[in-house]
Image (cartoon, rainbow, N blue to C red):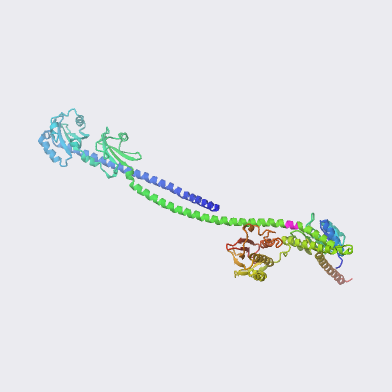
Amino acid sequence: MREFNVLVVDDEDEFRDLTVKRLEKRGLKAKGAAGGKEALEILEHSHTDVVLLDVKMPGMDGIETLRQIRIMRPLVEVVLLTGHASVDSGIEGMKLGAFDYLMKPIELEPLLEKLGDAYEKKRLHQEKIEQAQMKRHMSMPG
Amino acid sequence: MDQKNYYSAIKVRLTAIFCLLITVPMVILALFTISNLKDAAVKKIELSLGRLVDHKKEVISLFLKEKEDLLGMLVGMYPIEYLGHQENLNNLFKSLNREGSIVDLHVINSAGRQLAYVGPYASSITGKSYHDAQWFQEVLIKGSHVSDIFLGFRNVPHFVVAVTDPLKTYVLRATVNSEAFNNLLLSSLIGPNGDSFIVNREGKLQTPSRQGVKELSAEDRGYLEHHEGTSIINNGKTITATRWVKDGQWCLYVKTRIEDSLAAFYQTRNSVLIIIFLTGMAFLGLAALLAHYFLHRLEIYDRRRSELGAQMGQMEKMASVGRLAAGIAHEINNPLQMITNQAGWIAELLPDEDPALVKNMDEYTKAIEQIRHHVRRAGTITHRLLGFSRKLSSEKQSVQMNELIEEAISFVEREASYNNITIARDYHEALPTTMTDGPQLQQVFLNLLNNAVDAVGKGGKLEVRTALDAEGRLVLEFADNGPGIKPENLKQIFDPFFTTKEPGKGTGLGLYITYDIVQKLGGTIKVENRKGGGAVFTIVLPVITLGSSR
């Protein structure tokens, strides 16, 4: 698996820190954010490929954060994580452009797999855009 | 039982109210009519009695006048010299008295001396002077006199008529048998208890009372005032008509008992009563019928309402239970996440340790795997509770229930056949297709079929039936001939974690999920025990076509 940047957004410190630690152990570059605001700040300043976003958080909740991310960094893929009876919020998240949604409790392997898929999608997406930009450059003489 | 009493009490009350509503106005009308009829009947009696009295008065007056006129004519025709002779008077009496109503004849000169006499009292009367007699004076003054009635010879009532000639030279006096007079007063109109008689001014009876009355009663005496024309007095029992005759000397009484003359009225009244009674009975029957009908409707309505209430109660309970379960599941999911994370972290770090230093490496690895296994188990339960394991509301597809059920049966049939369980199908052939979530319904059918197979045991029988109800909805029945469901369990059979299976054999979520799915697909599910034993689950689903929106 290629190395990519993951941002873990969850208000629960224990979960966030451990997840970051485990992802890093698997060779990913992971950061943690305790809430939506912090997540957006980090996205602004540092490179991120995939966001693992808890749906239910105090303050700015996951859905609102997702909306902001889509505006700010349209290329960044978001995987939603929920422990709530929120098939509905899952659907809403998908409609807003989340890559997928996962239910707690989830083990690391399937989580890694999902994050990898998300990163792959992002990468392909980015490549296409770059190619398109190249074509444009090439078709524009001098 | 209480219910029965309640309804029959309402029924009685309703019937009574209907009855009162109908009969009270009818009775009032009847009483009013009868009272009016009676008044009219009494008025009619009074009127005819009045007419009778008028008529009798005419007859009596005529009778008296006739006698007076006869005598008047005689005194006018014959001079005193002629009639004063006993022989002439005898001849006259003979020719005059063919009817026998005249008892005797006196010829009296103006001085009151009797000149001649014909009659039975000749010996006692001959030569008597009447000069001082009041009647004689009256004749000389007025020209004529009619006496009161007295009992004369052989106890026969008589009265006296005396007339003088225009020159007042002599007086002709006749005693008249008044028996004929009595007959004049007879009339069928006055009835068997009626009476008719004549009294004089003093109230003395002049003709015999038909009821054998000897003296005027105090009440009748009260009517003895002089009045013009006919006076009619009604004292409630008796109608008395009085009229003065003979220039106010005699008073004619005619009395009739009201009761006797009301025969026609009673006949009419009885007819009215019979008609009212019959219509009353008819209305009573109608009222009872109406009450019965209303009660029947009420009972149906009540039953429907309580069924609906029970259904609503069940829905409400399931909704709150669902919320509670979801809340708990959510709260548990977070710690489960932490447990699996921490265990996973240990598993990841363990390989870094020096195997020589960790004595029980295998045990740790196994323990971690166990922890993860149990977290997965718990996770499965919470996910099922939350409906996570179900696919995201997949697109609706056109589903033929018969086919879908047949498919579900094919999954369980093999296992059932090992236990000699037969599955009977009774499919409605023209069952319409509906737009719904096939896979989820499939799960519902499987749940019900598996439960039924578990319930009946070896050699049991399942019955699956599809039908359309009156409102065009799909009715799917899954019945078995197992032991049925204990009544105390019926209410909580759909509750999450409610199970009658041995601990560890069932999660108690199957029927909860079944209920949840049916509910989300816009249908209802209920369970009943069959009379013949066993239970029947009935699912009712709407038929949704492409055009119709939910």
Position of B489 compared to A64: left or right?
A: left
Q: Position of residue B469 (x, y in %)?
A: 59, 64
Answer whether residue B68 is visible to the viewer in this image: no
Answer whether residue B494 is visible to the viewer in this image: yes
- Towards the viewer: B302 or B434: B302
Vertical side of B411 occupied by B24: above or below:
above
Could you tell me which residue is drawn at 61 percent across and 61 percent down?
B528
Q: Position of residue A64 (x, y in %)?
A: 78, 58
- The number of numbered discs placed on residues in the rendered structure image is 0
Could you tell me which residue is drawn at 71 percent across and 56 percent down?
B323
Q: Position of residue B457 (x, y in %)?
A: 64, 66
Quadrant hosting residue B107? top left
Position of B145 compared to A51: left or right?
A: left
- Towards the viewer: B157 or B87: B157
Quadrant hosting residue A24? bottom right
Q: Which residues are magenta?
A: B326-330
Q: Position of residue B104 (x, y in %)?
A: 15, 36
Q: Where the C terminus of chain B falls, by quadrant?
A: bottom right
Outermost residue to the front? B359
Quadrant hosting residue B433? bottom right
User: Residue B329 in magenta?
Assistant: yes
Outermost residue to the top? B132
Position of B280 compared to B499: left or right?
A: left
Dominant secondary-structure state across the stretch colored magenta = helix
User: Residue B393 in magenta?
Assistant: no
- Towards the viewer: B342 or A23: B342
